[in-house]
Image (tube, rainbow, N blue to C red):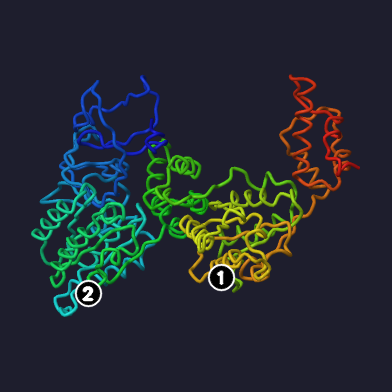
Amino acid sequence: MLAAMGMPGGGVLKIGSTHVRVVVGSVSPVNAIELPASALANGAGSEGSTVDGDRVVPHSAVSVTIDQPLASPRSLVGLPLTADDELNIEGGTVRVVDVSPGPVAVVTQATRIIQPGGGGTLDNTQNEAAPSAMTTGLEDELDTLTGWLQLVTRSDHDASRPVAGVVVSAPPGCGARELVDAAADEAGLHVMAVELRSVTTAERLLSRLETAATAMSDDTVVVVTDLDALISRDSGLQHQVTAVLRWFLEKVAGSRSAVVIVTATSDFAAAVDAKDLLPRTVTISPPSRARRLGLIMAAVDGSPDIDVERLANTTAGFSALDIEAAVLEARATSGGPLTTETLLDAVGTVQPSLGTTSLGEVPSYGFDKVANLVEVKRVLTESVIWQLTEPGRFERMGIEAPKGILLHGPPGTGKTFVIRALAHESGAAFFSVKGAELLDKWVGESERGVREVFARARTVAPSIIFFDELDALAPPRGSSTNNVTDSVVAALLTELDGVSDRGDVFAIGATNRIDLIDPALLRPGRLGVHVLLDLPAPEARMAFLTMTSVPMADDVDLGALVEATQGSSFADLEGMLRTAAIGALRHDSHAISVNMQELLSAIPVHNRR
């Protein structure tokens, strides 16, 4: 049931008027849910009743106010809290007075717990303005947004050119709202949230914004979220929404307040014809490997016993919220101190919220499954894995790491297999593209396909794009009467040259005919490292036959079999084993192994010696 709801490892549900964290468990009947008495008391329903459970992805709590002092406020970490919830903690009952941002948020290590004590409230953190861990790695964006808010809300700003505010563009769960809160705090401004998730008409939008305009005072940042759906092309409301939004922006412009539109649309201001009132966009990119490293270190409190490098490599496609959710899951299920293994298990249970963008595929096997090929694995390790896991090696030597590799050699020599193993070893998302798949007869479609592949790969970096049968996609320009391939080569050159920063995206091509690829793609800086995968040598064939899962009878002489398969590719050997196994089952349906004669008979005729 949880898997059908998109949360196979558990998550947060809204049940009745409260929120609960749900984990996988054994219940009877299978559609039952076991709730603690506190959840029932908080409005989740009554025993034996039918309830609706709606999946939610809550924000991280910036602050939580409770009505009773706690000896250990951090006992709240990991809990999704709603205002007026009553919790049984430390043998007593604690009521949640307020949660910010509301209506529900998850307590993290960075959350301020405000509780009664002495003559007023006591903040349990050393720094009352402790920033959310979600803003880790966004220092430049924080400085930019803080400066812009200070400029817009100044009393002496240029009234002849009224500006209402700024757009913050970010994928879901990447820290946009937390960034706005932190910037407002730095600028000394109050925050007013206007959430429009439930608004479906222009009339309701006008009512909501009118209320905000009435309640707004000087030195206020009005954060408007969830406008994307209202301005979508299919909604038919774009013109009405634009008119209402412009009215609101013009009302704010000229005052000592600012509007921040939080959206996933980078060209939002242009889409609603408000570029004059919202001239600046602060963009938060999906977390790069470097930012994921910082987020993980913050979430585990910098524990030296955690292999944060490994975790950063295995969380490609995770938002900041996904990383936080994985750490919370590990804390809830580990039953003891966090370890790298418990965190890796938790990472496997979290469905990345950036799944709207293809996350590619991370293969399940590594170099240990690659038969021999010592030199090939060495080149791939130095060219790819080093720059993803230890980029300092190249920086120390004052050189740029290679960004592309071309594997070439006869068919069946394992080019695709070894690249998939490389993706596993590096922890990178893996995108496999067949050369002919991108070719489209319609003008511009093939080039757009190339751009989209690189865009998806950048979103979930570090990533590997593998162009199989590259000769079909990028033949020498001018060699064909088809202008499509010339345009595709041009698009590939543009992406490989990094006119727009390619980030931790590595391009690898494979071909049986290196002479049929446009030479411009093969120079250093593009696919400049060339690796030959020739027909396997005897030691590689021996390693392959030793690693196979096909059981062999006692009469099988691997040395003689290696000699008999001289000139065979890995694909030929795989075919030989399959044919021999089927032959054994044909003679005896209960066979459990293949013998020497069956193997020799299965060697392709053109490879027999």
In the figure, 475 relative to 36: above or below?
Answer: below
The front one of 87 and 208 is: 208
Q: Is residue 108 left or right of residue 391?
A: left
Q: Circle 2: is it few (<14), some (14-19), or many (20+) Cα within 10 Å? A: some
Q: Is residue 453 left or right of residue 24?
A: right
User: Which amino acid type is marked by label 1?
Assistant: Asp
The front one of 27 and 263 is: 263
The front one of 103 and 164 is: 164
Which residue is rendered at x = 45% and y = 41% of the image?
Answer: 346
Element type at mark 2: helix
In the figure, 201 relative to 5: above or below?
Answer: below
Image mark count: 2
In the figure, 550 relative to 326: above or below?
Answer: above
The front one of 319 and 496 is: 496
Q: Is residue 517 left or right of residue 294?
A: right
Which residue is rendered at x = 31% and y = 55% of the image?
Answer: 233
Residue 497's label in the rendered image is 1
**Where residue 580 sits: x, y (%)?**
79, 31
Pointer 2 residue? 151
Quarter assignment of residue 2 = top left
User: Which amino acid type is marked by label 2?
Assistant: Leu
Front of the two marks 2 and 1? 1
Q: Quadrant of the N terminus?
A: top left
**Where residue 361 sits: x, y (%)?**
54, 47
Q: Earlier in the sequence, mark 2 or mark 1?
A: 2
Q: Circle 1: is it few (<14), some (14-19), or many (20+) Cα within 10 Å? A: some
Which residue is rendered at x = 74% and y = 65% of the image?
Answer: 515
Which residue is rendered at x = 32% and y = 42% of the image?
Answer: 78
**Where residue 458 sits: x, y (%)?**
48, 59
Q: What distance separates the C-alpha of mark 2 from that of mark 1?
A: 37 Å
